Amino acid sequence: MKKRIWTVLVLVLSMMLAACGTVKNGKPATEAVKLTADDQLYIGFVLDTLKDERWYKDKELFEEAVRSQGARVKTLAANGNDDVQLKQAELLIEEGVDVLVVVPHDAAFSAAIVELAHKADVKVISYDRLITNAPVDYYISFDNVKVGEVQAAEIVKQAPSGSIAYIGGAESDNNAILFRQGAMNVLKPLIDKGTIKLVYDQYTDGWDPKKAEANMKTALGKNGNKINAVVAANDGTAGGVINALSAAGLAGKVPVSGQDAELEGVRRVVAGTQSMTVYKPISLLATQAAEMAVKVAADKEINADQSINNGAADIPAVLLEPVAVTKDTIRTTVVKDGYLTEEQVYGK
Ligand code: BGC
């Protein structure tokens, strides 16, 4: 915030000079008042990727919410590349952002972003995914353990016994760890009782649907196609899993979870090849994060009701509620909120 203090000092000094009727640098001192306009807060948004449908929504909604508060925003996406993401953060810091909002590609690697930002007196907000082992200033996301819990709860409701496969997200993403943790909160007691058997348990590099498909093929191969249900961590991986099931003639016969309420995911729920998805109201996340970012940039107090230890410190956190969506609740959740339209989902 040193930069802002200087700006204010320059502004005050210039106004005093103007009051004395003096001229600064050969220009009328009233020019200095323009500093208020130039002083518009500047927010940098650094995304891991724009590959999954949801991140477009995050980008649009976040930018809109920042602009509606009169601040400036620039978004850069790193295509899943850590070095690119660090470079993009560096560029934005050099451009003079007042705060950096980061969706880290790799939870641990991105600690370097926090270090860089803090050296320049720029605060960092971890958006949706937590940066680990660095004193990041704030974290805003959904209750990601709960996401995993609602996924597994719906799957065991539909397939109360038998063999289950877990197809997770990217292990480098702290969320993927939390989703799995939540799923295991539900599955473990049933595994211990012997009601269900976890026959395959694999993270998916880079959240890549093709890799999820290959992993699901391996799972089916190893188990002679005898898999009764799949907890897949998001709609992307669920799509890969369902392709693999389809090739084995099992699509629609094996319950599969998902997350994100992506259009394709919700359409598969309607078609019956996917059993559920998790709706995370991105507009709430993006709007609240934008409000937080503008406040932090303006050095105002933030009320975070929770805190999460990320290995380096207790990080003030805001965690929003995820919502389970099945065939019966599509209209009363995602459609009702305008996240997807009736026409998009049902083609009417
Ligand atoms: C997000 C999910 C998303 C996944 C892949 C996770 O960190 O929370 O909503 O599906 O990344 O992009």
Image (cartoon, grey):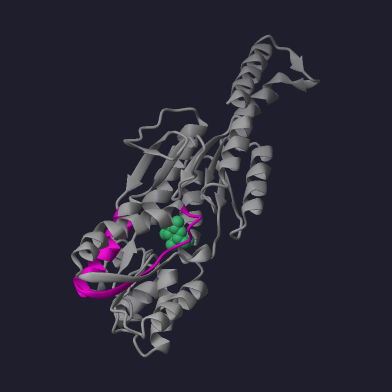
Camera-nearest residue between 192 and 316? 192
* The quarter of the displayed image where residue 190 is located: bottom left
Across and down, in percent, residue 293 comes to 48, 39
Across and down, in percent, residue 347 comes to 36, 81
Magenta-colored stretch includes residue 265: no
Residue at figure coordinates x 57%, y 46% from the top left: 110
- In the image, taking residue 50 as reference, residue 226 lies left or right, namely left
Residue at figure coordinates x 54%, y 62% from the top left: 50
Q: How many labels does the image show?
A: 0
Q: What stretch is highlighted in magenta?
A: 146-173
Camera-nearest residue between 263 and 179? 179
Check the picture and name the quadrant holding the N terminus.
top right
Residue at figure coordinates x 41%, y 47% from the top left: 287
Residue 67 to residue 159: above or below: above
Residue at figure coordinates x 41%, y 28% from the top left: 301
Quadrant where ligand 1 appears: bottom left
Residue 101 to residue 263: above or below: above
Magenta-colored stretch includes residue 167: yes
Camera-nearest residue between 22 and 287? 287
List the single residue furthest toward the right.
Answer: 26
Across and down, in percent, residue 282 comes to 39, 55
- In the image, taking residue 148 as reference, residue 211 lies left or right, namely right
Check the picture and name the quadrant holding the C terminus.
bottom left
List the single residue furthest toward the top.
Answer: 20
Across and down, in percent, residue 36 comes to 60, 28
Q: Decide if residue 296 is in sight here.
A: yes
Q: Decide if residue 280 is in sight here.
A: no
